[in-house]
Amino acid sequence: MKKIIALFSWLLISTCFLTLLTEFAESNHQADNLYRLIKSKRLKNRSQAELKADDEEYYYSATKTYINPQQYDLMLANKIKWLPGQPDGVDFDQYAGYVTVDPKTGRSLFYYFAESPQNSSTNPLLLWLNGGPGCSSLGYGAMSELGPFRVNKDGKTLFRNNYAWNNVANVVFLESPAGVGFSYSSTKSDYELNGDKLTAQDSYTFLVNWLERFPQYKTRDFYIAGESYAGHYVPQLAYTILLNNKNTKNTVINLKGIAIGNALIDGPTRSMGVYENLWTHALNSDHTHKGIFTYCDFAREGNDTKECETFLEKASDEIGDIDIYNIYAPICINPAFQNGSIGSVYNYDPCTDYYVEAYLNAREVQTVLHVKPTNWTACSNLFNWTDSPSTVLPTIKNLIASGIRVWIYSGDVDGIVPTTASRYSINALNLPVEIPWYPWYTNDEVGGYVEAYQGLTLVTVRGAGHLVPSDQPERALTLISSFLHGILPPSKP
């Protein structure tokens, strides 16, 4: 019962907070999807999800996982000879295509896979998931953040990302659940069933079938990373893998760790962290901050008082029209396509979403990606989210207990899931500190800060917002390389 009360408290405060996103949501799909999730009436019917969020039954299905064992020919068919507009000198193999996760309903998930330019036969396998819920790991993760290419301003050609994560791992980008990006179901009612549990189950089914298609990776060290609402996806999928690994009839996935960035993992502590962050970053007045923390109760029912609502509205008004995902970044005011303009990972472009959408909707590109003709969008509005526990902290506790590596990283200028929210969430776990807070370095500059707890590591990334690899690509590569090697980021220049 306490969990359910906490959920309603989180919803009420989060709904008020998200009024500050309404203008921005029109130009940023991730904000729009998060807004719809919080506002959804279905959130009021989550008692089962709340009660089973830390229960094996919530993640493990007794039904037999669908596996198609004869897929090697599909690997060859999925190979990409070249991506339209890609630069010269591409020195790694790429693959893309569909993996069926439910043949009865015709549910298939799309993936893009970039192997490492060097040491692909020994580098680990990394799965990347974007959040939303309902946003594309291809459009955001692969084409705007950590993938090997980004899209130029012409919307037709690509430029190389020198700090791509496939430099240190073989990276799979999965569009999940069905209905996101190129992923689809032949049974439209499937979209109404999407939620945390089905997403975890389908992602697990995708993995075991993908490993049948790429059997050379079956015994490879495996990691999962993601950001935002993937703070749900990643821990839930990791726990699903650990539970299903006990079934010796299935492929045992060699899961070694997870890394989640600016991750939504606990509703009440996130709400408290958001408003603390707004004040400490000079986005709210002293008067408004005092009013919120006087009249709003983040943990219990009763925060919907008139006084609380008044101060939350004032907080929204005081912020103004900024990019809440990076509070110091410029916003996209007039997106314009430009031929002959070559981009750079060092120059932030707030209009990137428009170039990516144009590129992925080109018929030639979709043919090369082996997808059926699709009106591709960065985020889906096809479905309502049927289950979403207010916290995944119990799941994270289970992962810590299993002994796998657990990192939470945080861009320190994000306003939607700020570092303060991550710190409050971690504090709720009551983990002892093993290595105290210290600065870490990249290229002779402070890249951020680290604190290592028993079983969990917090890493901040200086100057990054919600999309860490996009805002600080070099620092993000140092971070993920350290994570994969099982060492903390360097403490000296």
Image (cartoon, rainbow, N blue to C red):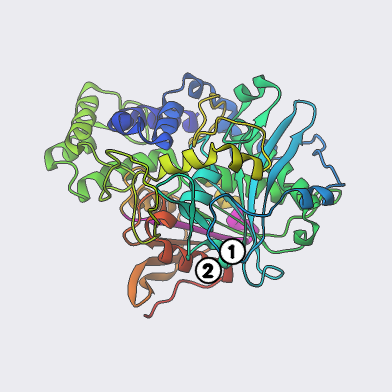
Given the image, on which type of amino acid does mark 2 rest? Ser
What is the x, y in percent for residue 305? 26, 23
- Label 2 and label 1: CA atoms lie apart by 21 Å
Q: Is residue 76 left or right of residue 325?
A: right
Q: Is residue 38 left or right of residue 191?
A: left
Q: Is residue 119 left or right of residue 328?
A: right
Total labels: the figure holds: 2
Q: Label 2 belongs to which residue? A: 481
Question: Is 172 located above or below residue 388 in the figure?
Answer: below
Residue 112, can we see it?
yes
Q: Label 1 belongs to which residue? A: 90
**Magenta stretch, residue numbers:** 399-412
Element assignment for label 1: loop
Q: Please report whichever mark, 2 or 1, sits nearer to the chain's N-terminal start.
A: 1
Rendered residue at 81%/38% (across/down): 66
The answer to whether the residue labelled 2 contacts the one labelled 1, judged by CB atoms less than 8 Å apart, is: no
- Using the image as rendered, state which of residue 303 and residue 254 is in the foreground: 254
Which one is in front in this view, the residue at disc 2 or the one at disc 1? 1
